[in-house]
Amino acid sequence: MQKLIAALLIVLVAILGAMAFQNFRSLAEPKFPTPYQAVVLNGGQVYYGKLENLAALYPVLRDVFYVVRKENLETKQVTNVLVRRGKELHGPEFMVLNRQSILFIEPVRSDSDIGRSITEQNISEQKKNE
């Protein structure tokens, strides 16, 4: 009987240890393998940038980009253009997000269309500043 109780205690301790480990992992801030992330908000807006302090109530998104649809009035052809945030009238340098408004976050691969466009804009911006 004592062996059964000892075995049950060992199993119980193992289960509690596994649960504590999973809980600890769920509190850790996710790490992304890419410099830029796609942040999708509850309203459907998508912003691309460098996400900081994801575990905070108000994460910060820096070096922000978003996609704007443009239509050629003559041909009616619609194109998507990646725009760097900051050119607006109020000149924002970063975005402070409400964590509860974030639906999901994905890494932006550097060889994706968005990743290449960000790289091209960054290179163009560097050349302007030289």
Image (cartoon, rainbow, N blue to C red):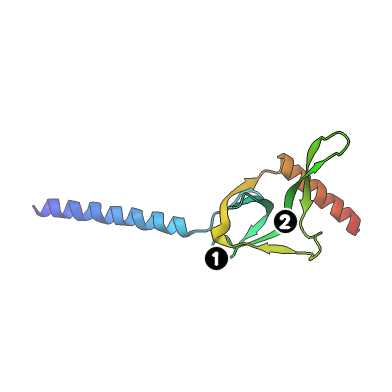
Q: Is residue 71 visible?
A: yes
To which quarter of the image does residue 99 belong? Answer: bottom right
Label 1: how many residues lie within 10 Å, few (<14), some (14-19) or many (20+)? Answer: few
Q: Residue furthest left?
A: 1
* Residue bearing mark 1: 57
Identify residue type, mark 1: Leu
Query: Residue at coordinates 20% horizontally, 56% vertically from top-left?
Result: 9
- Residue drawn at (70%, 60%) of the image: 62
| Percent position of residue 60, x then y | 64, 63
Cα separation, mark 1 vs mark 2, equals: 19 Å
Q: Amino acid at mark 2?
A: Val
Q: Position of residue 29 (x, y in %)?
A: 53, 58
In front of the other: 33 or 88: 88
* SS category of the residue bearing label 2: strand
> How crowded is the residue under tag 2: few (<14 C-alpha within 10 Å), some, or many (20+)?
many
Of labels 1 and 2, earlier in sequence is 1
Specify whether 93 is left or right of 40.
right
Q: Tell me residue 48's x, y (percent).
A: 69, 51
> The residue tagged with tag 1: helix, strand or loop?
loop
In percent of the image, x 57 and y 60: which residue is there?
54
Nearest to the observer: residue 2 or residue 77 = 77
Q: Measuring from the top left, give residue 77's x and y in whole percent.
A: 82, 35
From this view, report whether residue 88 is shown above or below residue 32: below
* Mark linked to residue 1: none
Quarter containing the C terminus: bottom right
User: Measuring 83% from the left and 35% from the top, which residue is drawn there?
Assistant: 76
Dot 2 corresponds to which residue?
64
Q: Is residue 35 visible?
A: no
